Amino acid sequence: MSESSFGLFGGIESAVRKFAKSRYRIGLFLLIFMLGTVVGTPGPGYAKEEVGPGVGQPASTNGVSIYVSKLSKTLTLSQNGKEIGTYPVSIGSKSLEGDKEIEGDLRTPSGEFYVCTRNDKSICYLALGLSYPSISDAERGYEQGLITETERDEIIRANNAGEQPPWNTALGGAIEIHGERNPNGSTQGCVAVDNDVMDILWQYCNLGVPVTIGP
């Protein structure tokens, strides 16, 4: 075989080796990147450090949901359909007389809501604000002459956008899940839990987490 042939094969061999090394380096880089992504991602269910109104595109809820029973006075926290825990709560003192209708009726509202605020400076330890009044509350309030058309439309807009609805209308507002529960007491309409329970809820609940309040 001629010297030029050896040179040709040598060049090909060198190119193949360089190509193999480059593929190895690319594969190693992708592996390190994926491992870094997994390690750097917060564990399932843990909330981001967010405080304030909701946003048009709510944060991931990680499959977390809350159900509050007004009859048993309990709150159940679940993730992906699996119960994490059920905890005692205190609710509005007149909640068993019916659904919340107006400001100051001392009733905890019933219905489908979502977490629209996270307040780590609450006078009640920590607080998760709920999206009351809902769209159905706004429509009812307008039909009953309790709120204006503008107020109704703003409540509907905020709910559709995943934001905090107005809390300053005749329907009331600032309904929260918060700490500092009095085991033998009631609230003015909020859902109160013990502080150690609030710590758990704070860890799990992003803005947008659905909250159902029912029987």
Image (cartoon, rainbow, N blue to C red):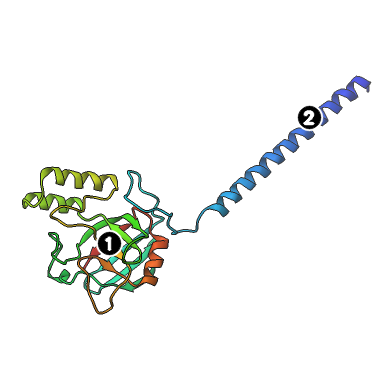
Q: Amino acid at mark 1?
A: Glu
State how many labels appear. 2
Instruction: Tell me the residue that label 2 is attached to.
Output: 15
Query: What residue occupies the far right of the structure in this picture?
Result: 2
Instruction: Tell me the residue that label 1 is attached to.
Output: 176
Query: Nearer the viewer's eye, disc 1 or disc 2?
Result: 1
Residue 166 at x, y percent in the picture: 21, 50
How busy is the neighbourhood of tag 2: few (under 14 within 10 Å), some, or many (20 plus)?
few
Q: Quadrant of the C terminus?
A: bottom left
Displayed quadrant of residue 105: bottom left
Displayed quadrant of residue 17: top right
Q: Can the viewer see residue 83? A: no
- Please report the residue visible at 89 percent of the width from the left and 22 percent of the height from the top: 5
N-terminal of the pair, mark 1 or mark 2, is 2
Q: Could you say which disc has been placed on residue 33 in the image?
A: none
207 w.r.t. 184: above or below: above
Compared across the picture, whether 4 is left or right of 202 comes to right
Residue 199 at x, y percent in the picture: 40, 67
Q: Can the viewer see residue 72? A: yes
Compared across the picture, whether 104 is left or right of 55 comes to left
